[in-house]
Image (spheres, coloured by chain):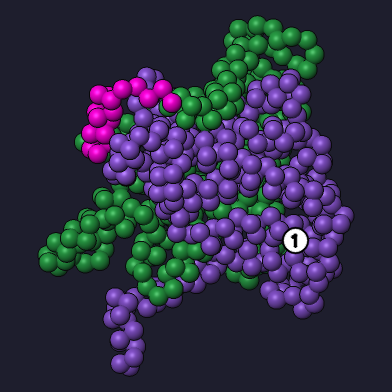
Chain colours: A green, B purple
Amino acid sequence: MAASILERRDLKAPTDWVAYAFIALFTVPFLIFNVAPILFTAYLSFMRWGIFGPPRYVGTANFRDAIENDHVRIAFGNILLYGLTIVPGVLVLGLLAALYVHNRWPLSSFARVCFFSPYVVSATVIGLVWVWLLDTRFGLINHYLAYLGFDYIPWLTSTTWALYGVSIASIWWDMGLAFVLILAALQDIPGDLYDAVEVDGATRWQRFWYVTLPMLRPVLSMVLTLQLISTLRIFSQVYVMTSGGPASASTSVLYEIYTVAIRNQKFGLAAAVSIMLFAVILVVTLLSRRLLREQQT
Amino acid sequence: MTVLTRFLKSHNMRPADVPIWLFGLAVAALWIMPFIWMISTSFKYPGDVMTADIEWLPRRVTFQNYVDIFTKYKVWRWTLNSVIVVVASTFLCVLAGALAGYALARLNFPGKKALFFLYVASLMVPIEVYAIPMLLGIIKVGWANTYQALILPSVGNVFSVLIFRQFFLNFPRDLEDAARIDGAGHGLIFWKIALPLARAPLIAATVIIFVLNWNNFLWPLLVTFEDDMKTLPVGIAAFTPLYGTATQLEGYAMAMAGVTVLSVPSVLVFLILQRYFIQGISSGAIRG
């Protein structure tokens, strides 16, 4: 509301030519390092280009190659699996942690720091720490699982488990963002909504189900979208923890793009897979925007 | 008893809440155990690391792992690279974002709406999608393994613009109007009035972009293939057992020393400026 009034006032004002100087410092690098490479990616996806010689137009051959490429197919299947494990994990744990900290019980700020802090460290830290924790023979996780009577699980070295090992580390890394966003939304719920149902004698569960959860729906859809997109982009953890292996079991689309480009030097194919990944991200974003809007009306 | 009831009451707790409260605290403590284990391992003798007994507190403490990573590997050099790259790119990104955000919120110029739309639309294309083609371009102009190649692509981070635009849109413009009547130009108003008032988004943007840049992985990995130009996260990542370097030879002790060093700056900045960090992240600017 405030924004639209301000903008209307701006329209009547004379043009501030100096504005172009203001935006230049941001816009010039933005155009060179964000916009231009995007256009270049689209161009390359229709070219065949190795290290030697100029790029050659090949039409949609790269896309056909990508679809027929087993590694690429496995990678798209894997990010689906990653999405099915990481996204619900992050959403549920983030919601529970936020509800807990929102009570403002003693030491809740300690809990807040604990739940959020993994989010601020680098993928290298996440990766190496979890490779050590998930070590088959001496890792902490298997050590304590053995107490509970489980056999040692080869978390990162077997084709069955590698993807889930990486997922556990990713949930630990990403949960902080979901947690903080949901916590902020909890704090924005007006208190009188709770007072109203309190009068009707609602139980704590009913208050959660009929007031909190509906009020959280926008933020939950937003977190869902953000997490879906960041899971589609999963790369660094995979790179550090498993290199996509064993036998492509934990590879991701970005990891395959990286392999195709850096190891095999097929830049056109890499660009085509990039465009396909972008298309998936775009569809997810637009669908969830649509879902959000339907909820609000 | 009365002490307990008073304690419960002052924190708005019912007796039935106490187990949940304690359970939650236990989970929170458990959640940071990987960090504790990381630090604990980093102070162990390599021979004490891969053992069947779990030693949370090392029986014998050594600093040798830290000495080793700085002397046997180029951790000094990588730290220096990281500091140069992160300071420069964060400074440029925040300054550029403040200027552009101010212009979008306060100034009137043709193309403003289109530009803003372009910024927001670009959020849908993550850098990973165009990193490889950008790398080809960077190699073509001879910028591989250079600081400018590490720094400049981080400047155009739209988050920085959005956080300042949001702030200036919601901030009363009376002071700036008064200065304008006194004949001050936009540049002067921005420097002398608007920017000092924008302390909160300035700190929030700096902290968040600092952490993002410090942890940046894919782009530095792609654009540096000389050991001397690696940044700290990329350099330390080579301690992973997969590549058969440090970890396989020396166990996890040194790897954990490396990642402890790597976590300290971003965790410290977060702990000290927590309020700004969390506010900045949840301010809505990130939603785009």
Tag 1 residue: B257
Residue B4 at what x, y percent from top left? 34, 88
Residue B120 at what x, y percent from top left? 43, 30
Image quarter in which the C terminus of chain A is found = top left
Residue A191 at what x, y percent from top left? 22, 61
Question: Is residue B172 placed above or below B103 in the rendered structure?
Answer: below
Residue A21 at what x, y percent from top left? 48, 27
Front-most of residues A44 and A30: A30
Where, by quadrant of the figure, is residue B176 drawn? top left
Residue at 29% across, 54% down: A188
How many discs appear?
A: 1
Where, by quadrant of the figure, is residue A79 drawn? top right
Residue at 70% across, 10% down: A55
Front-most of residues B85 and B283: B85
Chain of residue at mark 1? B
The residue tagged with tag 1: helix, strand or loop? helix
- Helix, strand or loop for the magenta stretch, by majority: helix
The stretch drawn in magenta includes residue B202:
no
Please give left or right for residue B211 compared with residue A211 in the image. right
Res A232 visible: no
Please give left or right for residue B215 compared with residue A31 in the image. right
Query: Label 1 is placed on what type of residue?
Result: Ala
Residue at 34% across, 91% down: B3
Region in magenta: A1-18
